């Protein structure tokens, strides 16, 4: 990552203030250590006790942990329901009239939905799904803007046991189609469109395009958000509000196995085909809820805002399931941070008195660039805790977040986790663990992490290596949808008996973890995971392209940017026009967020003698503009010379 122009000096250790520690859910290192030790000594008893006290069960579980590596089951024999735990149970307490969701649309429309009202809306939509014949075990795709109905759709599916897969609204029809097909979904839940930077993102058009190739889909439900014209296919498409006219409110929560599939979320892997990460019910919910209390130090009076989209795992665990299970008030904002101006987020913090604010380093960097006057116009004193996720937080971003947004009084919880881990795994309990800016600090109770070398042997503290996890955790992915072999191969074959994270990291002498980034062909662009292979496959589908190799290039705002090396078929020479066209092509094939920053045309790509593209060399060229690494397996040295020379001409 590009370092900031102005070096910032940060404190090396930031202990919790006495004031924060005094009110914290977990206060002092001894308390953290006691939790950690008790979980590591007897994970079944530790998590089993929490599951009994923190979740509501229709039937108690027989066994807390069943670990048959690499397959895990938590709370077997138990029956529960996620929507019951996230919504209905709160309606039986003093929380019933508490705001569950505070929503603001990009145009400025506002809705405050209490737990009672949310329960009513979830039941009504669950009833609409039942009217369409949906039942436990069926699969749905949710392709929605960031509006309360996205959460309502997720919860309604959970209430009747339909396994959902949310597809980020920024994905194209092509990407949507691939996910619907892989999941063999029966229903698509969408909207006419949503608002982003003052323009309508037309979701239903993309759905129509995708559904031409998805024979498993029987129904499509469309929520009217923008009110613009959209095609409705007779027999297949239904308006949400029309179904609602005959909806019932007495839909019982299905009593589901603890291991019932709650959702599948597709994420980029190291091949062109996205992986459907499967999360189930009891373990996932428990860890999402507990991390709200431990890491976000959630209190009854908090107003909590995580800026992630529900299309990503952060939106699942920390906009919807975690906060609602914990009975929090969760803020949902539909649009862009710069609309109508760069102070939109700070305006919202001030207006709704947000007390916990969770976002990504890429967003922080983009906002720093716009100047301090934007946040300074607003009263941000309601904030008491800040959080960061998605990539390592660089010193300049940490310093600004701490000083300008947190007024130097708020802890910053740097949370390391992945789509696969389901919930936070390495992060500070802010009233207990002293922060070290840039480090995710220490693991959650019971998690044993290690740093190893290529052979799987632990490396000494202070040395760089691969981050692996040696113990199962409740929100762990259960498999890759429909492909248990890929699950075993991807995560459990690199180091026998351990989960391979794909991240490089080091542990310091205090046991703190420092994440250094991906070691596989996965890029991290604006905190979104993109696979080099997925973009390469998209590029070679273009008729002019012969071959392509894609690498992540350091970028000041987005962390990494997509840089594509492309060789063309014979006779094609109009590079300028084609460069633009190919960027557009990738946006169309995958989604606008995957649009390459740069297309470099080249005569040939560096390859090994066996014909494998050496992306490592290309990475070196875009990162350091030289190649210092081992080139002994390179077949044709001339390729390298011409690629490096090409850069010199830039
Ligand atoms: O490389 C790590 C990085 O994001 C990857 C996971 O991406 P994804 O599945 O899209 O989930 C993102 C949100 C949980 C990780 O393998 N990453 C995530 N959080 C951090 C991070 N890197 C450093 N520090 C973090 N706090």
Image (cartoon, rainbow, N blue to C red):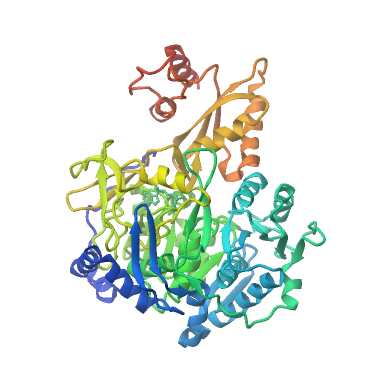
Against 626, residue 203 (above or below) is below
**Quadrant where the image shows the N terminus:** top left
Q: Where is residue 96 drawn, in percent x and y?
A: 51, 85
**Numbered marks: total:** 0
90 left or right, relative to 456: right
Image quarter of residue 599? top right
| Residue located 57% across and 66% down the image | 154
State which quadrant residue 322 falls in. Answer: bottom left
* Horizontal relation, residue 164 to residue 626: left or right: right
Residue 202 percent across, percent down from the top left: 70, 54
Extreme residue toward the right, this view: 234
Quadrant of residue 59 in the image? bottom left
Q: Position of residue 383 (x, y in %)?
A: 40, 68
Observer able to see residue 353: no
In the image, 124: left or right of 368?
Answer: right
Closest to the observer: 538 or 395? 538
Comparing 211 with 434, the one in front is 211
Residue 311 visible in the snapshot:
yes
Q: Is residue 645 left or right of residue 25?
A: right
Q: Residue at x 61, y 54 (%)?
A: 169
The x, y position of residue 554, in whole percent, is 43, 36
């Amino acid at each position: 990552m590009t370092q900031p122009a102005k070096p910032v000096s940060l404190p090396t250790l930031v202990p919790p203030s006495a004031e924060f520690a005094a009110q914290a859910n977990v206060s002092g290192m001894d308390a953290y250590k006691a939790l950690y030790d008790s979980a590591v000594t007897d994970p079944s008893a530790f998590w089993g006790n929490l599951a009994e006290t923190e979740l509501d069960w229709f039937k108690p579980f027989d066994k807390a942990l069943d670990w048959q590596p690499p397959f895990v089951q938590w709370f077997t024999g138990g029956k529960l329901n996620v929507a019951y735990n996230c919504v209905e149970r709160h309606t039986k307490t003093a929380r019933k009239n508490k705001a569950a969701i505070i929503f603001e649309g990009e145009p400025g429309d506002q809705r405050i939905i209490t737990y009672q009202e949310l329960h009513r809306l979830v039941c009504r939509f669950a009833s609409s799904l039942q009217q369409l014949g949906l039942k436990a075990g069926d699969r749905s795709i949710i392709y929605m803007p960031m509006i309360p109905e996205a959460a309502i759709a997720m919860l309604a599916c959970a209430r009747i046991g339909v396994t959902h897969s949310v597809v980020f609204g920024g994905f194209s029809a092509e990407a949507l189609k691939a996910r619907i097909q892989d999941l063999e979904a029966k229903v698509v839940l969408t909207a006419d469109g949503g608002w982003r930077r003052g323009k309508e993102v037309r979701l239903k058009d993309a759905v129509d395009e995708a559904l031409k190739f998805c024979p498993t889909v029987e129904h499509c439900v469309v929520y009217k958000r923008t009110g613009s014209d959209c095609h409705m296919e007779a027999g297949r498409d239904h308006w949400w509000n029309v179904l609602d006219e005959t909806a019932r409110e007495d839909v019982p929560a299905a009593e589901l196995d603890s291991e019932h599939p709650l959702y599948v979320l597709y994420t980029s892997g190291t091949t062109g085909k996205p992986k459907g990460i499967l999360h189930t019910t009891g373990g996932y919910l428990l860890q999402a809820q507990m991390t709200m209390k431990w890491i976000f130090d959630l209190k009854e009076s908090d107003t909590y805002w995580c800026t992630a989209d529900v299309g990503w795992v952060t939106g699942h665990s920390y906009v919807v399931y975690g906060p609602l299970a914990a009975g929090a008030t969760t803020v949902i904002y539909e649009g862009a941070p710069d609309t109508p101006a760069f102070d939109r987020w700070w305006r919202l913090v001030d207006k709704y008195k947000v007390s916990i604010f969770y976002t990504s380093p890429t967003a922080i960097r983009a906002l720093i660039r716009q100047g301090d006057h934007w946040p300074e116009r607003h009263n941000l004193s309601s904030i008491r805790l800040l959080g960061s996720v998605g990539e390592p937080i660089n010193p300049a971003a940490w310093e600004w977040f701490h000083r300008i947004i947190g007024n130097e009084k708020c802890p910053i919880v740097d949370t390391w986790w992945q789509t696969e881990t389901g919930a936070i795994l390495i992060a500070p309990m802010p009233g207990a663990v002293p922060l070290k800016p840039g480090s995710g600090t220490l693991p959650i109770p019971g998690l044993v992490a290690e740093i190893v070398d290529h052979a799987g042997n632990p490396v000494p503290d202070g040395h760089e290596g691969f981050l692996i996890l040696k113990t199962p955790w409740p929100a762990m992915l259960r498999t890759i949808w429909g492909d248990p072999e890929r699950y075993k191969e991807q995560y459990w074959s690199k180091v026998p008996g351990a989960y391979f994270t794909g991240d490089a990291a080091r542990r310091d002498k205090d046991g703190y973890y420092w994440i250094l980034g991906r070691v596989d062909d996965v890029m991290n662009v604006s905190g979104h995971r993109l696979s080099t292979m997925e973009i390469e496959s998209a590029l070679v589908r273009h008729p002019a392209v012969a071959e392509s190799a894609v690498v992540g290039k350091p970028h000041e705002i987005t962390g990494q940017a997509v840089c594509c090396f492309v060789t063309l078929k014979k006779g094609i020479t109009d590079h300028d026009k084609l460069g633009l066209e190919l960027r557009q092509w990738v946006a169309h094939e995958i989604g606008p967020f995957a649009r390459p920053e740069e297309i470099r045309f080249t005569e040939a790509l560096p390859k090994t003698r066996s014909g494998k593209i050496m992306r490592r060399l290309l990475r070196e060229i875009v990162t350091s503009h030289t190649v210092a690494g081992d080139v002994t397996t390179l077949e044709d040295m001339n390729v390298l010379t011409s690629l490096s020379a090409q850069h010199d001409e830039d």
